[in-house]
Image: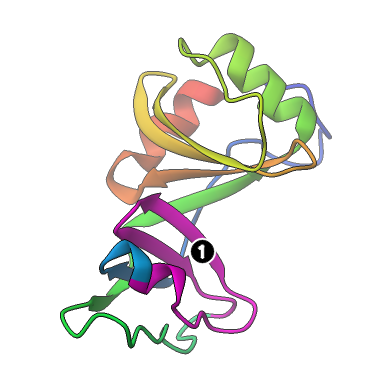
């Protein structure tokens, strides 16, 4: 079990509502993101925009006429505290976490493909495909 507040279930994920945006990197750099959303730049030309509320407004990408903007319901996420990030890094990750933050780190976590959106304060957002959600939660428990 992760060292944390016993009232919470660490690593317990919830489905995330959002948008997938695939466009030229410069177009993503210039995009207008919905207020309150969280943008996870998965790769230079691919972003997952987590809506502030279910059914939230779509991102606006005008600098790439071929941009693909589509609803995304394939990710689940959990917020991890600084202590939980340290525990997961020590016990469930075989690769080195980036020292510089904020950063996106991705690889196997507890043997399951996942991503960590590492925040400047040391906390993180754990992202996992919904299809692998139960397996990751079980392995982190």
For residue 128, which quarter of the picture?
top left
Q: Position of residue 92 (x, y in %)?
A: 52, 15
- At 69% from the left and 44% from the top, the residue drawn is 119
* Residue at x-position 39% and y-position 38%: 134
* Left or right of 136 on screen, residue 80: right
Quarter the C terminus occupies: top right
Q: Is residue 110 above or below residue 18?
A: above
Depicted 40 relative to depicted 138: above or below: below
Along the line of sight, the residue nearer the viewer: 53 or 38: 38
Q: What's the magenta region?
A: 27-53
Extreme residue in the left direction: 66
Q: Position of residue 90 (x, y in %)?
A: 62, 11
Q: Quadrant of the N terminus?
A: top right
Residue drawn at 57 percent across, 42 percent down? 12
Dot 1 alpha-carbon crowd within 10 angstroms: few under 14, some 14 to 19, many 20 or more = some
44 is higher (above) or lower (below) than 108: below
Residue under numbered circle 1:
39
**Secondary structure of the residue carrying numbered label 1:** strand
* Place of residue 53 in the rendered image (x, y in percent of width and height, measured from the top left): 57, 80
Q: Nearer the viewer, residue 49 or 73?
A: 49
Residue 104 or residue 12, whichever sits in front:
104
- Spot occupied by residue 96 in the image (x, y as percentages of width and height): 53, 15
The picture quadrant where one finds residue 30 is bottom left
Left or right relative to 97: residue 127: left
Q: How is the image coloured?
A: rainbow
Q: Is residue 108 left or right of residue 37?
A: left
- Whether residue 39 appears in magenta in the rendering, the answer is yes
Q: Is residue 19 visible?
A: no
User: In the image, what residue occupies the spot 64% across and 77% down?
Assistant: 36
């Amino acid at each position: 079990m992760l060292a944390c507040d016993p009232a919470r279930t660490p690593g317990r994920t919830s489905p995330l509502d959002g948008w997938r945006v695939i466009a030229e990197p410069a177009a993503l750099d210039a995009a207008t993101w919905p207020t309150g959303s969280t943008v996870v730049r998965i790769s230079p030309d691919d972003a997952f925009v987590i809506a502030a509320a279910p059914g939230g407004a779509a991102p606006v990408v005008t600098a790439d006429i071929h941009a693909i903007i589509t609803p995304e319901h394939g990710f689940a996420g959990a917020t991890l505290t600084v202590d939980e990030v340290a525990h997961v890094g020590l016990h469930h990750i075989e690769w080195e976490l980036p020292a510089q933050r904020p950063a996106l780190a991705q690889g196997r976590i507890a043997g399951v493909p996942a991503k960590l959106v590492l925040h400047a304060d040391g906390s993180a957002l754990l992202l996992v495909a919904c299809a692998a959600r139960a397996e990751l939660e079980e392995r982190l428990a």
